[in-house]
Image (tube, rainbow, N blue to C red):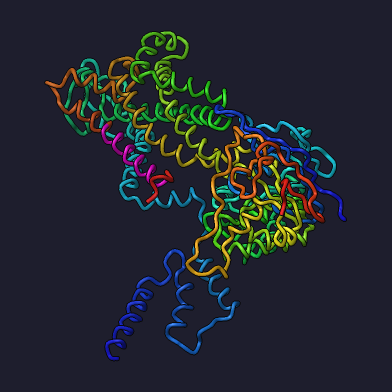
Amino acid sequence: MRIDESSEQTGTQSFNDGYSINPGSELGTAGFLEPQLAIATNPLETTLSQSELDLRTQEAVTEGQSLSPIEASLRRLGRDKRAMVCLAVIIFMVVASYVFPIFYLHMGPNIQGGIFGNASVPPELYHYMQHQELLNLDAPSSLAHPLGTDQLGRDILARLMAGVNVSIQVALFVEIFDVVLGLIIGVLAGFFGGWIDTFLARFTDLMFAFPTLLFAILAAATLGPAFVDALGPQGRLILVSIAIGITVWPQMARFVRGQTLQLKEQQFIEAARMSGSSNQRIMMQHIVPNLFSIVVAAATLDIVGTITAEAAISLLGLGVEPPGSSLGLMINDAAQRINISLWEILWPTITLSILVLAISFLGDGVNDAFNPRTKD
Amino acid sequence: MAEKLLDVQHLRTHFFTRAGVVKAVEDVSFYIDEGETLGLVGESGCGKSVTSLSILRLLESPPGKIVGGKVLFQGEDILEMNREELNALRGGRAAMIFQDPMTSLNPVYPIGYQIAEAVKAHLKLDDKAAMNRAVEMLDRVRIPEARRRLNHYPHEFSGGMRQRVMIAIALSCNPQLLIADEPTTALDVTIQAQVLDLMKGLAQEFRTATLLITHDLGVVAGSCDRVNVMYAGRIVEAAPTTTLFAKPAHPYTQALLAAVPRSDTPKGSRLAAIGGQPPNLINLAPGCPFAPRCPKAQARCRAELPPLETVGPNQQAACFYPY
């Protein structure tokens, strides 16, 4: 008898404890637990009227808001600490590289410099990323040049920020290209099947066969001068971006096609067709929004490849042309001075590493949060 | 007697596959009167779903192709309709409920939007009126707090509730014909009964004729006025529900009924089963397709195909030796 009583007591106690520790978590468990509690503690009140129950569930449910799958994924991503730190790093680098140069041009003392070393040079000049202080080459960190100068006396911090800008521009351009082309071709191939699929899938395979770097090098070497003539100094960059984009989209198209094939078999597609929706409407309304997760996850991971590819091409001297700046170009320049000043190569490599690592980790986080297959 | 709403005549649907031509639906004729519920029963793979998909031309083509017959819907042949007429018919005058409620709603939209979408397209209502209609329909299918639930996503509903949402979508445009393709297969038994009662009640209320496809004879007994039994792509027996259960004519129907487990079967006894497998629809032997599994098969059954003939009042069967 006694043992029974005590065990019963501890049972209710732990139940009560659980309840008090966690009063109404996300789903509003309070409302669901209450009736049970009432039954457990008060044997006289064993039943609740339907209206009372309704009232309770209503209270419980209104507390938790309704989340779309995308909102739920974003929330999952928000809980991923590593991804959030990386996101902060990326946002910092992007904002800093675009905004900080404006202020940087007005920061710092006037220095003795110029061609003969006797002129007073204001920061507006020497903090311009193309300005050369020819008497102050390979200088270490100083008040005027926080990260020192390179082999032509240019401010390394200014060039670093310009280089990050280039990386981000290329990444954005390539990703837009990648997503648009990958989505269109993947959805069309997956949705229509038949000869359209055969044609598009074979075309995708064909494009997939190009190695990114080799293709970009080939394009830059053969068409580079023509693009520079036509579009000015930015021409090479645009050409390289297009070349990378061309080799990146087949992967995206494959993902999208695979997912579309799966989605197409879901009954809501059949139901949509049943309710009189046209093919175009089914693709835009029902397929594409459901591809959001996989596209976001794949695109984030593609950025890593894009940024490193651009750096590699610039490193080989086929990307951004010298007066301009790029992380790859800076590494190439600095590599020749590695015996004289080690820091010159450290800054761009460290920056590139941090950028790539941060995006890569963020990509992993996005993949975990958005990809339905990796869920829990 | 009410007018024929849907009249399917000699429908033939074949699948052209690498292994050969699968005659999934072969010379199927039946009709549904206004407001009536017709059951279509049979084993898996006997052509029930293909029949329903053929009626609304929802088959993937290729490989599926309707090779013959007529599907008259209020006198118009659906098989002759052009794309616009079809789109206006589907979801408007004829609606369909699918088997798996878990995948029949689009996960990225709130359900209110999904109901309103159908309403806007077919009833030409504006956004607000469509939303009101959605609330009304959710109320009708007894989803509590309909107005608040409008903004919820499919993953926030249970299977039974999703199927009710599907019913709400299907009935939102006042269709004259509702095709329900195994609407309760994916639900557990108590929910099945609720959903079936709901469908039955609403179909009566809206004066909607229902084609109920199922392999569950219990479902048929509970909700159908008449039953067609399919086997190997053909209708083998057609009768009012009471007649079919009281006096099944075709040996296949008899075997099906015998295979239903009953509460009064002695404990420990084996469940009755129909021996063998349904035939391969690619190479059908001449004669009755059920003959290899039929306990009463005679030489004639293996040589000749029995036509669907009247065997009793309102009862037809495709068998040389009925009862």
On screen, residue A72 above or below A228: below
On screen, residue B243 above or below B124: below
Q: Nearer the viewer, residue A375 or B46?
A: B46
Of all residues, the one furthest to the bottom in this rendering is A1
Q: Is residue A135 magenta?
A: no
Q: Can you tell which quarter of the image residue B145 is in?
A: bottom right
The reply to whether residue A335 is visible in this rendering is: yes
Instruction: Provide residue B177's location: percent of width, then percent of height.
Output: 76, 50
Residue A145 relative to residue B278: left or right? left
Give the magenta range. Answer: A353-370
Q: Residue at x 58, y 66 (%)?
A: B262
Residue A261 relative to residue B289: left or right? left
Q: Count the labels in the image.
A: 0
Q: Can you tell which quarter of the image residue B112 is in?
A: bottom right
Q: Can you tell which quarter of the image residue A53 is in?
A: bottom right
Q: Residue at x 52, y 51 (%)?
A: A68
Instruction: Provide residue A338's location: percent of width, then percent of height.
Output: 15, 22
Of all residues, the one furthest to the left in this rendering is A339
Q: Nearer the viewer, residue B306 or A135?
A: B306
Q: Nearer the viewer, residue A304 or A27?
A: A27
Q: Residue at x 36, y 77 (%)?
A: A15
Instruction: Provide residue B109's location: percent of width, then percent of height.
Output: 57, 49
Check the picture and name the quadrant holding the N terminus of chain A.
Answer: bottom left
On screen, residue A245 above or below B76: above
Report the predominant secondary structure element of the magenta stretch. helix
The reply to whether residue A273 is visible in this rendering is: no
Q: Nearer the viewer, residue B241 or B100?
A: B241
